Image: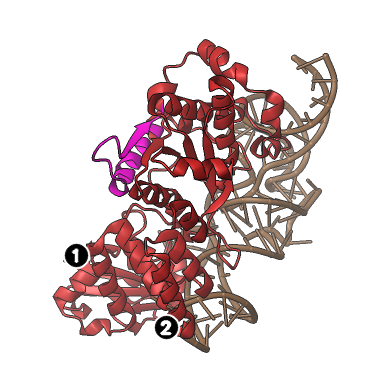
Chain colours: A red, B brown
Amino acid sequence: MNILDELNARGLIKDFSNEEEVKELLDTPQTIYCGFDPSAKSMHMGNFVMISLLMRLQRVGHRIIAVVGGATGMIGDPSGKSHERNLLDAKTTASNTEALKKQLSRFLNLEDASKGMIINNYDWISKISIIDYLRDYGKYFSINNMLNKEVVASRLANGISFAEFSYTTIQAVDFLTLYRNYGCRLQIGGSDQWGNLTSGLDLIKKIEGPETKVAAFTMHLITKSDGKKFGKSEDGALFLDKEMTSPYALYQYFLNTSDDDAVKYLKIFTFLSLDEIEKIAKEHYASLGQRIAQKVLASEIVKIIHGEEELNQVLKMTEALFSGNINELTKEQLEIVFKGIKKISISGDIGLLDALKDVGAASSKREAREFVTNGSILVNGNKITDLDAILTKKDALFNCYQIVRRGKKNYYLIEHL
RNA sequence: GGAGGAAUAGCGAAGUGGCCAAACGCAGCUGACUGUAAAUCAGUUCCUUCGGGUUCGGUGGUUCAAAUCCGCCUUCCUCCA
């Protein structure tokens, strides 16, 4: 099974600029590029689909280039956005760019430039003067054409600035530059990137000749079968940075995937072979309550993103929190289990409501009061309904810890010094 | 450059002088049920020392009383040039 068939079988690919051409190109080692937008300081699971795709392509021998958009990030990609956005300042963009580079390097093989590299488009875009830009590139873009692009057309009613309107031309220059400097003939992106990918193809063919072999294809956006937005957890998106989304939270998110989505996601996110997935799916559907696919999915994802060690940590935590009695753990086990959990250290007694607010279980004392009244707060396994309860050191486990649970799944730790 | 319109909580959107801490929908959170699910039902979503305090783009006014009226500013939209 060649790589293209495999990607199709996994349900990854949405559109091709030209399927035959892509197929032909992928038969021989190619240089393939994908851009990443530094609009946040960490990438999320949606970006991870693109990263994993680069990994898959790299594994079968293609050279991959991850472009971090230090320049394009300064302008703002209108794709998928219904409103004009505020610009990020240069400092934020620069620090985000560095953060993304660091994240990408964890997943991609960069040991030598013939296998893969990460580059920043600021390096070349920032050197182009406005006159050169308009003469060398601007001349090749037709406004009529650009107005027809879905991204722009959908914004004409609400308004779009010249900056965002022009964004696509800059990304096109990126593709042209990579084609010239690295022989890059393929660009991939999320389905919202379609307009930007075709801009690049158009520009290259206009400048380098219509016979130039370049192509692009896009991935499906990940959806959930209930129609809700994928990858949104309590604290916003599912980030790859473990400071922003703990490995435990990531695991729990995927463990709670619906039955059908679990199998779908195994194909999309994991590197298990399709045969293995087929086998897992069979067992999965034979006893749905066991959530076999969800468990494999969650484990695989945590392993890929955070590593085997973190996964073991997470599995221990999950087991302790959901099956065992927390009060029976030894002090050492408890410390291991709660390593990745939000915690505060205090000296002296503290009111329960203040503790809930300080540890992040509630965003205000009013909310803390609401949780206590609803009976959703447990301390060391005991439900507390007294609004005036005080947490004291003598009630703490091992004279040290109090485990606060909010609702069914949220844990926090109070440490008495 | 000119004329008109808009800005309300996480998002969408009512409200056009007091009954507005602000309808409704979405989303979130909590409880019940369950498979740590989905669906469903119920509660809840500015802060508080529970006296009250601070909100409706910003600011200054009018009024006993302003999200609501007036002036100025900012941002956005539409049309004209």
| Numbered disc 1: secondary structure | loop
Residue A85 visible, this angle: no
The residue lying at 43 percent from left, 81 percent from top is A283
For residue A369, side relative to residue B19 (left or right): left
Dot 1 crowding, Cα within 10 Å, few <14, some 14–19, many 20+: few
Q: Which residue is mark 1?
A: A347
Three-letter code for the amino acid on which mark 1 is drawn? Ser
Q: Is residue A172 above or below residue A355?
A: above
Q: Nearer the viewer, residue A264 or A367?
A: A264
For residue A365, side relative to residue B65 (left or right): left
Three-letter code for the amino acid on which mark 2 is drawn? Gln
Which portion, as a residue range, is magenta?
Answer: A93-121
Q: Quadrant of the N terminus of chain A?
A: bottom left
Q: On the image, which quarter does residue A69 sit in? A: top left
For residue A256, side relative to residue A332 (left or right): right
Q: Which mark is residue A290?
A: 2
Dot 2 crowding, Cα within 10 Å, few <14, some 14–19, many 20+: few
Residue A313 placed where, x, y %? Answer: 24, 68
Q: Nearer the viewer, residue A34 or A30?
A: A30
Residue A263 placed where, x, y %? Answer: 48, 70
Q: Chain of mark 2?
A: A
Q: Nearer the viewer, residue A344 or B40?
A: B40
Q: On the image, which quarter does residue A110 sit in? A: top left
Residue A105 visible, this angle: yes
The residue lying at 39 percent from left, 24 percent from top is A181
